[in-house]
Amino acid sequence: MKISTKGRYALRMLADLAEHRSDGYVALKDIAKRQDISKKYLEQIVSILNRPDILKTNRGYQGGYMLAQAPDKYTVGDILRITEGGLAPVSCLEQEENTCERRNYCQTLFVWEGLYKAVNEYLDSITLQDIIERKNDFSDFDYVI
């Protein structure tokens, strides 16, 4: 499994919004500058994430985007499932019910199910709040030589 640029940038964009949530609505150009991502690419990502439970939008002079919920309500797993279309390592696990004709005698199915479970549990255990707190941990270091 490889996470696409779209998924990585969406996560960075939402983490940026979480970090700047006290600023109110944030313009895409500001996120683009801070994250070194083209504004055009962010516009594509916004079209995927522009759902009432993910983003709030405000048009006009003070327009921009903000999170619809608190940062601790967004998991990395949820964000990547939206942008990537799923996290299944093999096609037979992409649907709720495995309909593969080999599912009853596939010797390796348990490997893929285990990987899928581990990936989902790990990514669902990390929130945007965790990401911004970890960034703050790194920025607390003040080295002087």
Image (spheres, rainbow, N blue to C red):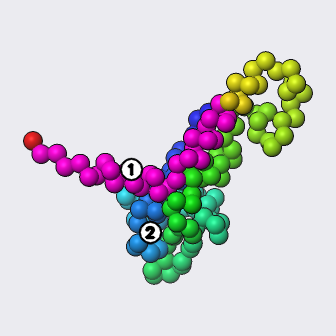
Return the x and y of residue 72 as percentages of the image width and height.
Answer: 52, 59
In the displayed structure, does residue 124 sit left or right of residue 89? left
Q: Nearer the viewer, mark 1 or mark 2?
A: 1
The quadrant holding residue 31 is: bottom left
Whether residue 111 appears in magenta in the rendering, the answer is no
* Amino acid tagged 1: Arg
Disc 1 is placed on an element classified as helix
- The residue located at (56%, 47%) in the rendering is 125
Q: Is residue 130 above or below residue 101?
A: below
Q: Position of residue 92 (x, y in %)?
A: 79, 33
The residue lying toward the viewer, choosing from 118 and 19, is 118
Query: Residue at label 2?
Result: 21
Residue most extreme to the bottom: 61
In the image, residue 51 sits, relative to residue 9, either above or below, namely: below
Query: Magenta part mainly helix, strand or loop?
Result: helix
Magenta run includes residue 128: yes
Q: Quadrant of the C terminus?
A: top left
Residue highlighted by disc 1: 134
Q: Which type of secondary structure does the marked residue at label 2 adopt?
A: helix
Q: Which kind of residue does numbered mark 2 sit on?
A: Arg
Residue 13: x %, y % from top left = 48, 57
How packed is label 2: few (under 14 Cα within 10 Å), some, or many (20 or more)?
Answer: some
Looking at the rendering, the stretch of residues picked out in magenta corresponds to: 115-144
Residue visible at 44% across and 75% down in the picture = 24
As drawn, which residue projects farthest toward the right?
Answer: 101
Quadrant the N terminus occupies: top right
Q: Do we see residue 6 in this rendering? A: no
24 lies above or below 73? below
The residue depicted at 16 percent of the width and 45 percent of the height is 143
